[in-house]
Image (cartoon, rainbow, N blue to C red):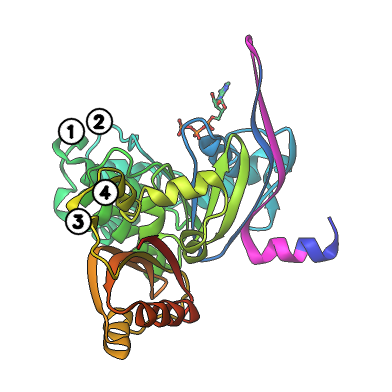
Amino acid sequence: MTDKTAASHQRNLVAIRDLKKTYRTEDGEKVALHDVNLDIAKCDIYGIIGLSGAGKSTLVRCINGLEQYDGGSVIVDGREIAVLPKHDLRTVRRSIGMIFQSFNLMPSRTVAGNVELALLDSGLDKNRRKSRVKELLKLVDLSEKADNYPNELSGGQKQRVAIARALANNPSVLLSDEATSALDPNTTKSILKLLKHLHDTLGLTIVIITHQMSVIKQICNRVAVIDRGTIVEEGRVFDIFANPKAPLTQAFVATTSNLGKINDLLEDGSDLVNLHSGQVLLRMKYISKEVSEALVSHISRSFDIDVNIIFGDIDIIDDAPLGGLVAILDGPADRIETAIGYLKSRNIGIEVLTQ
Ligand SMILES: Nc1ncnc2c1ncn2[C@@H]1O[C@H](COP(=O)(O)OP(=O)(O)OP(=O)(O)O)[C@@H](O)[C@H]1O
């Protein structure tokens, strides 16, 4: 490693270079990770998304030292995981919190008992452990459930216990492996809100492994898309949603938007898209962070045309609107053309669907 790459690795909490992992089984070899490269900076909420079998869990296990890899390097907090002596590996593992889809709570212990388990090696005496458990349960808003058992909790509450336990030793990074996959959409939202709050208040770096692009959209600032062991696309969440390049990324982004529905309406000959003469059906995509003005009322007023929105799907990501609208523009052809020219000049992605 050159001095320059070593320095850049240190700025990143997790730096992965050319990581390779092959499983060897009786049925032969299965390459799970091919030359994976990733940089996760301190305070990122970094999403890793892929379909089932893409290699997400293998990647997480390489980061936390549970899996040995065949090539490349995984550096966490400046230390190469593969060459760490056992004692140091334990210390690094303690600086990595983990939460899972299945919660992994001990059914025979109370909520407080489950959280305290993580503190048994911490060197704290019993009283200090008890007060740390209280503090942690307060942090995840579960103080009143301290004496309950896991089977008396909802899925969301169980995940809160798991989060409290994962934070017990003040980890520098929290790895979340499909932690919301078994939860309903509202509970998912509340868990993601909690993770965001912990990120904002504790400066926690979070790595979110998921197969749901909606999770990435709600909470992450960067995302990597993994396909059959290879990272096919990586970048800022806004940029990836605005301009997905790899076909798999495009498919993931499409799952979070209803803008594609217009194609079904057109195919079905729906009355909604039955145009009269002079009308133009448009799909507009907000693809620039600079767009913040009220575009629809602006073009309607400035070019004296009617804009009939059929449906819209606009989210705010990184404080900027992202998404789009499907609308019918109605008016004289030259004014519609000028309006479309104006929208393009404002960096709005324009697709004329029918006219
Ligand atoms: N212990 C193992 N032995 C052999 N093959 C394995 C082992 N663990 C994973 N694999 C294989 O490696 C590939 C990647 O698996 P991995 O579990 O990392 O994917 P994943 O993206 O986490 O999938 P899922 O979302 O279904 O959990 C898959 O083809 C899987 O069958």
Q: Which label belongs to residue 265?
A: 4
Ranked by sequence position, the earlier of labels 4 and 1 is: 1
Q: Is residue 245 left or right of residue 211?
A: right
Q: Main secondary structure of the magenta part?
A: strand
Q: Describe the element under mark 1 as helix, strand or loop.
A: helix
Q: Is residue 144 above or below residue 334?
A: above
Q: Report which residue position mark 2 lands on.
A: 107
Query: Crowding at label 4, few (<14), some or many (≥20) Cα neighbours within 10 Å?
Result: some
Tell me whether the residue at label 4 lies in contact with that at label 3, contact meaning CB atoms closer than 8 angstroms. yes
* First in residue order: circle 4 vs circle 3: 4
Q: Tell me the kind of residue under disc 3.
A: Leu
Note whether residue 347 is visible: yes
Q: Are marks 3 and 2 in contact (CB under 8 Å)?
A: no
Residue receiving disc 3: 272
C-alpha separation, residue under disc 4 versus residue under disc 3: 8 Å
Task: Name the element at disc 2.
Answer: loop
Q: Label 2 sits on what residue type?
A: Pro
Mark 3 and mark 2: Cα distance apart in space = 54 Å
Instruction: Indicate which disc, 3 or 1, sits on the residue closer to the N terminus.
Output: 1
Mark earlier in primary sequence (4, 2): 2
Side of 139 relative to 271 (left or right): right
Judged left or right of residue 39, residue 110 is: left
Residue 276, by quadrant, is bottom left
Q: Amino acid at mark 1?
A: Asn
Q: Do the residues bearing badges 3 and 1 touch, measured as CB atoms within 8 Å?
A: no
Say whether residue 58 is left or right of residue 36: left
